[in-house]
Amino acid sequence: MNIDLLFKIAGVGILVAVLHQVLSKAGREDQAMMTTLAGLVIVLTLVIKEISNLFATVRTTFNL
């Protein structure tokens, strides 16, 4: 497993958490929620790429 992926996910999580707090304190709850959802989508795309690579590796390993 690539350690860079964990750092990317952690970085996105920290950034989203800070932005959520700042926007919540400023009274912009809708934008805070949209920021959280955008962060979730970014992390899911990173994870889906890795899962796709895993399935490709399994296919080549077992000649499927």
Image (cartoon, rainbow, N blue to C red):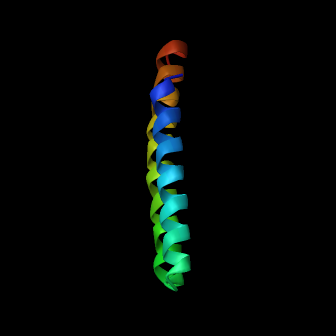
Look at the image and tell me whether residue 48 can be seen. no
Where residue 51 sits in the image (x, y, percent)?
52, 35
Where residue 17 sits in the image (x, y, percent)?
55, 59
Residue 49 vs 61, above or below: the answer is: below
- 13 and 5: which is toward the camera: 13
Residue 46 vs 63, above or below: the answer is: below
Where residue 22 sits in the image (x, y, percent)?
50, 71
- 18 and 8: which is toward the camera: 18
Residue with the most extreme bottom position: 27
Q: Residue at x 46, y 17 (%)?
A: 60
Look at the image and tell me in which quarter the N terminus lies: top right
Residue 31 vs 64, above or below: the answer is: below
Q: Residue at x 49, y 84 (%)?
A: 28
- 58 and 27: which is toward the camera: 27
- 22 and 38: which is toward the camera: 22
How many dots with numbers? 0
Q: Residue at x 45, y 28 (%)?
A: 4
Look at the image and tell me whether residue 18 can be seen. yes
Where residue 27 sits in the image (x, y, percent)?
52, 86
